[in-house]
Amino acid sequence: MITLTSVDHVNAAPEKVWYFLTHLHEGDTYLRWHPADHKAFRLLSGDGKTVGSTFNAVEMLGGKKFSLKYRLKRAEPQKYLEYGAAGVLRPLRLATGTFTLKPSGDNQTELVAKVHIGYELPALDWLVRKVINLAAIEKHMDEEGYYLNQTLSK
């Protein structure tokens, strides 16, 4: 299993960060989160903050366009969100994404974003590394943190 991590200090309270992350389907919120890479976002079912909500996101990673369908697996208001693949890929459990929000000072949030890719079998990591551009995902995650901070500190 490969885990990519991005830690950002956002100049906004956890409630504001939580609201942003759970309302990506509203207006241009998703597009503002990463103006260059995020292309479209649609809520397919649920309300965006309740376990079982499903989404479709279209984004660019490493110059390639991806359409990602995922579902909210776990949610602890203002603290934690966990997403996994939805649809046909759900039984494979190939990727999971998490956001952990922690208050850090006055009106600030430490946001830890993680993407877990692959299986528990280390022997399969070589395949994941050949097929998936991990550097592009890491760059994208870091840029999302930057844009989130720019958006929420206004």
Image: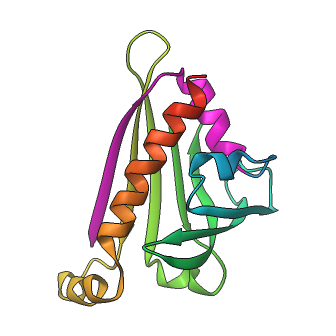
Residue at 36% from the left image edge and 72% from the top image edge: 117
Q: Is residue 142 left or right of residue 46?
A: left
Q: Is residue 126 left or right of residue 148?
A: left
Quadrant where the N terminus sits is bottom left
Point out residue 38 in the picture as x, y percentages from the top left corner. Answer: 61, 60
Q: Nearer the viewer, residue 99 or 31?
A: 31
Residue at 62% from the left image edge and 26% from the top image edge: 16
Q: Is residue 19 left or right of residue 127?
A: right
* Residue 9: in magenta span: yes
Point out residue 91 in the picture as x, y percentages from the top left corner. Answer: 54, 83
Point out residue 103 in the picture as x, y percentages from the top left corner. Answer: 43, 21
Quadrant in which residue 94 is drawn: bottom left
Q: Nearer the viewer, residue 32 or 79?
A: 32
Q: Is residue 84 left or right of residue 126?
A: right
Residue at 44% from the left image edge and 40% from the top image edge: 146
For the image, the number of numbered tags is: 0
* Residue 59: in magenta span: no
Q: Is residue 150 above or below residue 119?
A: above
Q: Is residue 106 above or below residue 128?
A: above
Residue at 54% from the left image edge and 20% from the top image edge: 13
Q: Nearer the viewer, residue 79 or 60?
A: 60
Tell me the magenta residue range. Answer: 1-24
From this viewpoint, is residue 79 visible? Answer: no
